[in-house]
Image: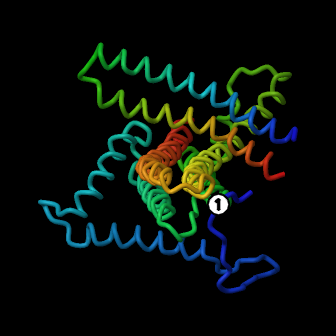
Amino acid sequence: MMGLLAAGLSIAIAGCGAALGIGLIGAKSVESMARQPEAIPAIRVTMIIAIAFVESIALYALVISFMLIAK
Amino acid sequence: MSASSEPLLVLYNLSILGINISITSAVIVIWSAALIVFLLSFFAVFQAKVVPGKLQSIIEVIYEFFDSQTNELFGEQKNRWLPFVLALFCFILICNLLGMVPGVYPITANINVTAALAIAVFLAYHLAGILSSGFGKYFKSFIPKDVPLWALPLLIIIEILSQLARPFSLAIRLFANMTAGHLITLTILSLIIIYHNIWIAGFPFLGRIAIGLFEIFVAFVQAYVFAYLAALYIGLAIQEH
């Protein structure tokens, strides 16, 4: 029972952090795209890479919560 | 720790010196992925034309993209390390895409495969550093100059930890992304069985299409991130003089 709670809490807290991070990345990228439309391709590639990094941090927590459930 | 839905079938039992190296369904998928990468790149440049055909232009786009991305990282040693990065990208991409075919064992959702790839990168970037600046000089470059003697043990511990974190995060990133994709697909499709209602069955079906398209995108992005990080580590090791 506590394991299930811990699994849910771990992915929930990690999801909060990752959502905040992806939101900040998206906001800043849109801002800089609007300011400098000629740099859109470069910004888009960098944005996708940054989002992939943030997302993988949330997925670490997903792995931990699956390990907690499987235990 | 394998959380994949596909069972691992043992096709042929084999062990050498007590180490189990049985031919399993995952091994067959790895071999076929390697064969596909080889055949694609071989037929793309077998009879290279000035005006490229379909296959040749795909390979050329991938090559030119990585060529422009790694120009500053590799510098003069590009011919030595660009093939490694390109091979990593193509192999991981084909593995990720093969894992999406129903019935095929998803090998990049297995921690052993991604760990092997990450260890290959770990060895490769140390080799790059040793080849470019010599054995003693490369390992001396880990310690910054003018460091007081009392801080040395702490610095060595931090350096060892950060070196070990690199292959670990590479392996876990690819594994977690692919596993999460397969598990989300499984969860969405099992909604059909959970609700047991024919009027709801269409929504998981449409959701599975959307998730599938997103998973193709993730397959490309993760292959690119893996290859780019490998290039970044090799570039850092080359530039440490």
Left or right of A35? Residue B7 is right
Residue B188's x, y, as percent? 55, 51
Residue positioned most to the left: B51
Q: Amino acid at mark 1?
A: Ser
B18 versus A13 height, above or below? below
Q: Would you place residue B16 above or below residue A59 in this image?
A: below
- When asked about the image quadrant of residue A29, the answer is top left
Q: Nearer the viewer, residue B232 or A42?
A: A42
Q: Is residue B81 visible?
A: no
Residue B109, compared with residue B66, is above or below; it is below
Is residue B19 visible in the rendered image? The answer is yes
Q: Nearer the viewer, residue B231 or B93?
A: B93
Q: Residue at x 20, y 72 (%)?
A: B47
Say left or right for B65 vs A61.
left
Residue at label 1?
B4
Residue in view at x 62 percent, y 67 percent: B6
In the figure, residue B36 lies in which quadrant? bottom left
Which one is nearer the viewer's eye here, B107 or B37?
B107
Q: Is residue B188 above or below residue B20?
A: above
**How far from the left and from the top, in percent, is residue B228?**
47, 43
Q: Position of residue B210 (x, y in %)?
A: 42, 47
> Whole-percent x and y of residue B134?
60, 47
Chain holding disc 1: B
What residue sits 53% from the left and 71% below the top? B103
Q: What is the quadrant of the N terminus of chain A in the image? A: top right
Given residues B86 and B82, the one toward you in this image is B86
Structure colour scheme: rainbow
Q: Is residue B3 left or right of residue B67?
A: right
Which residue is depicted at the point 40% across and 71% down? B38
